[in-house]
Image (cartoon, helix red, strand yellow):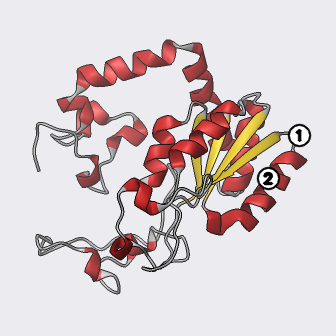
Amino acid sequence: MSYEEPGCAYCPENVRACRVGETDERGPGFCPTKVMADELDQAVALYDDPELLKIAQVSGRIEAEGYCQWTRVEEICQFAKKMGFKKVGIATCISFVDLAKTLSEILESHGLEVASAACKNGSVPKEDMGITDAEKIRPGNYEAMCNPISQATLLNKSGCELNIVLGLCVGHDSLFFKHSEGLATTLVAKDRVLAHNPVGALHLADTYFSRVWGPDKPEKRPKLPAGGRKN
């Protein structure tokens, strides 16, 4: 492990000193406080911006108030309300439109205005994006390209202050985040194989889903814990 860049993923389970304020004393050599202290100071200074500070404060309070009690849907509703937002957007996969309707109704029941945009809006043929017929999911058929930049544009135009991503594909979600003017959060990360529970591939990486590994898989790996633990 390089001692020139942060490597939090390799921090031993019995260390993780940042949780308890002992980073300087017990953090490993690749701890961010040791290899990028100046960058950390610059990042923390950004919270002097009142808007960024409010987001951080509201997020922390929600984390404590609903810890292991609120679903993510409830957390999003509370975040939007405590931030004082009036209008929320939903950027949904076309396959999730029925769920988007339920989510929209839930948000509206909390007094929020909602706009929503599906990924296939505009019905742009994949050929217009340089994708060949052989590269389609079903060659020989019309397939509309996912259009996340347009989703962001529509929700921006609607004045959405918070946008919720509901099942956008990998890469498409990246384009949406890049072009969203409002804050953005993910409710559902698409994973058709794992019933939209992508962390399952990590928990089972050394057993059932060992196919996720590339040719340079490490020979010995510690056994992963079954689930998360308290911050």
149 sits to left or right of 32: right
Residue 69 against residue 22 in the figure, above or below: below
Amino acid type shown at disc 2: Ser
Where is residue 222, by image quadrant?
bottom left
Residue 136 in the image, given as x and y percentages of width and height: 41, 73
Q: CA distance from mark 1 to mark 2?
A: 11 Å
Callout 1: helix, strand or loop?
loop
Residue 23 placement, left or right of 54 = left
Numbered circles on residues, count: 2
Residue under numbered circle 1: 111
Q: Specify which label sits upstream in the sequence, 1 or 2.
A: 2
Which residue is disc 2 drawn over?
104
Q: Which amino acid type corresponds to the residue marked 1 in the rendered image?
A: Gly
For the residues carrying marks 1 and 2, which lies nearer the camera in this image? 2
Q: x and y percent of residue 65 in the render?
A: 71, 43
Q: Foreground residue, 132 or 62? A: 132
User: Does 222 appear above or below 127?
Assistant: below
Residue 117 rendering spot, x and y as whole percentages:
67, 50
Of residue 149 and residue 130, the one placed in the foreground of this image is 130
The structure residue drawn at horizontal position 45% and vertical position 68%, both measured from the top left corner, is: 199
Q: Nearer the viewer, residue 132 or 185?
A: 132
Write down the quadrant of residue 81 in the picture: top right
Is 209 or 22 nearer to us in this picture?
Answer: 209
